Image (cartoon, rainbow, N blue to C red):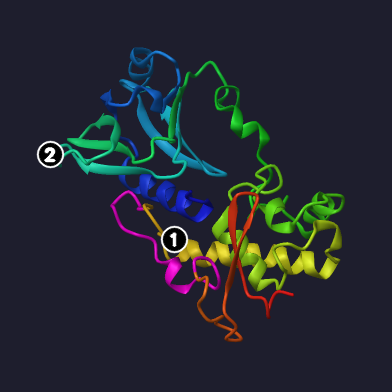
């Protein structure tokens, strides 16, 4: 699933390619992709004639701020990529890609297409008379953004203090920190020298401070190279992310640790993979 760096990369791309473009219509090829409103006709009617004013990211959600031609608020276009979703901004003359689920027709003979192989992705139109959190309920549960002032070492310590579960599982909890997922949790735990099975209650203050710093470091490193492509992720121009080439442990099971040479191990935790170095992370 795309995580914060991948979703932020898409957000930045959308802000470069779609701003001030009018949505002139659309076509929903897979109705269950639309999470709200429940009528496809209402979804398309709500978007038609609005202009994409600015894109925002919250956790792993993309939120397109919509305006009318008179610069009045016209609601929101919400997107969650889930496992394999892609947003592509293309010329209308481009051949339709396999797994295209939704098309939005923009001014200037452009299209914003939602491509989703595994069909878990969702799209919402939030009417202007409702808050985005009311309609996209998942936003209500999100913890602070990693780069925000709220995500301090003391905040993280308080969140982990009484949680009797492995730290790897806790880092995947979006109520603790928004946008972090499997890839960057593994990477941050490696840089902070913490074993993924270490229980939250066992962590010392210094370890938590290192962990917070490592989370910011790996997220920024990935943002700098456009995210990670291990399966289907691409930005709005169809370009892969490059962080995977420099990953410390994620996806490198059986390969030598870049620091000590010990073979990277992989284990299953709560149905997810965890990659770690048994020498560096004891």
* Label 2: element kind: loop
Residue 196 horizontal/vertical position (percent): 69, 63
Residue 179 or 272: which is nearer the viewer? 272
Residue 228, numbered circle: 1
* Label 1: element kind: loop
Magenta includes 71?
no
Q: Residues within 10 Å of mark 1 (few under 14, many from 20)?
A: many
Q: Which residues are magenta?
A: 234-251
Most extreme residue toward the bottom, as rendered? 260
Mark 2 and 1 residues: CB-CB less than 8 Å, in contact?
no
Q: Residue at x 80, y 49 (%)?
A: 159
Identify the image quadrant of the C terminus: bottom right
Mark 2 = which residue?
Answer: 93
Between tags 2 and 1, which lies in front?
1
The image quarter containing residue 42 is top left
Between discs 2 and 1, the one toward the N terminus: 2
């Amino acid at each position: 699933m795309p995580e914060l760096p991948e979703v932020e990369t898409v957000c930045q791309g959308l802000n470069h390619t779609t701003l001030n473009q009018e949505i002139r219509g659309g076509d929903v090829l897979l109705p269950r992709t639309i999470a709200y409103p429940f009528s496809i006709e209402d979804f398309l009617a709500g978007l038609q004639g609005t202009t994409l004013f600015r894109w925002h990211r919250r956790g792993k959600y993309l939120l397109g701020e919509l305006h009318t031609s008179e610069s009045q608020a016209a609601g929101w276009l919400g997107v969650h990529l889930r496992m394999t979703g892609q947003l592509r901004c293309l010329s209308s003359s481009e051949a339709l890609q396999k797994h295209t689920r939704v098309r939005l027709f923009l001014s200037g003979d452009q299209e914003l297409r939602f491509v989703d192989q595994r069909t878990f992705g969702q799209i919402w139109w939030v009417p202007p008379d409702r808050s985005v959190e009311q309609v996209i309920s998942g936003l209500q549960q999100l913890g602070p953004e990693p780069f925000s002032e709220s995500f301090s070492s003391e905040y993280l310590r308080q969140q982990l203090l009484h949680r009797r579960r492995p730290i790897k599982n806790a880092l995947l909890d979006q109520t603790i920190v928004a946008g972090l997922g499997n890839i960057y949790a593994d990477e941050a735990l490696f840089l902070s020298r913490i074993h993924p099975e270490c229980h939250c209650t066992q962590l010392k203050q210094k370890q938590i401070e290192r962990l917070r710093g490592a989370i910011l470091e790996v997220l920024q490193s990935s943002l700098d190279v456009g995210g990670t492509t291990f399966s289907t992720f691409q930005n709005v121009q169809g370009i892969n992310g490059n962080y995977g080439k420099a990953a410390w442990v994620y996806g490198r099971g059986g390969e030598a640790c870049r620091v000590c040479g010990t073979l990277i191990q992989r284990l299953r935790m709560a149905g997810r993979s965890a990659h770690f170095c048994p020498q560096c992370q004891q």
